[in-house]
Amino acid sequence: MVKNLTDKIIRDARDRAEKFVKEAEEKLEKMLYDREKIISKEYTEKLAEAEKSADREAEKEISNFRLEKGKEILERKNRLIKEVMEKLEEKFNLYLKDNMEGIIAGLAKEINEEDYTVKVPETSGDISIKGVRVEKDGKLKNAFIFEGKSWSLLFNWERFSGAVSGYVREKAGRYLFEDNGNKK
């Protein structure tokens, strides 16, 4: 029962994550393209200058410049992936806040048990679902918990991201690190 519920949450989360990743990918593509264009121009200028004085020092400078720019691009890509995850967390928490009652009602239909409680944040509005005992919990924020006699299921960003972060990071990384047929 909990596995079915968890699988449903993961499927729903994966669908939402794909939408968020697509939006983030479009924004990241433009940002990365602009930055790589600047870096490429800088690189071309530096390379032309170094070719004029082809001594060892110039070769060393080119090598260091390539390394520096490679590190800069890698750092930028890592920051962009982090920004994607932060934006996804913001959107997730906003979605959860705005749709908590509907999400709980949908998940409650999947539970084949009658004696359980759903704990929600104190800041959530009045949630009333037929057949579901809802309690407010001051310790919760951007989360809710289903609790039965011998089980508990927490629904929050950490659980959600744990289920989909590998997928999101893989998609964002593939998008950022692979050519994907785009000339940048």
Image (cartoon, rainbow, N blue to C red):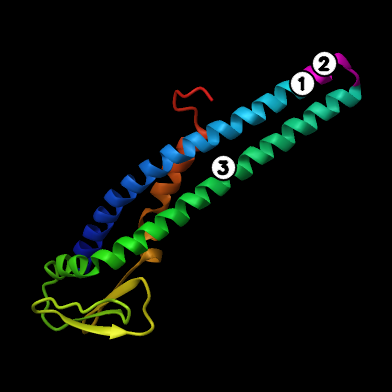
- Residues marked 1 and 3 touching at CB (< 8 Å): no
The stretch in magenta equals 48-55
Q: Quadrant of residue 162?
A: bottom left
Q: Name the residue under label 3.
A: 77
Q: How many marks?
A: 3
Q: Counting other residues with Cα less than 10 Å from the Cα at mark 1, is it few (<14), some (14-19), or many (20 or more)? A: some
**Amino acid at circle 1:** Leu
Task: Using the image as rendered, state which of residue 3 and residue 98 is in the foreground.
Answer: 98
Q: Which mark is residue 47?
A: 1
Task: Using the image as rendered, state which of residue 149 and residue 156 is in the foreground.
Answer: 156
Q: Name the residue under label 2.
A: 51
Q: Counting other residues with Cα less than 10 Å from the Cα at mark 3, is it few (<14), some (14-19), or many (20 or more)? A: some
**Amino acid at circle 2:** Glu
Is residue 51 a member of the stretch shown in magenta? yes
- Residues marked 3 and 2 touching at CB (< 8 Å): no
| Image point (83%, 29%), residue name | 61
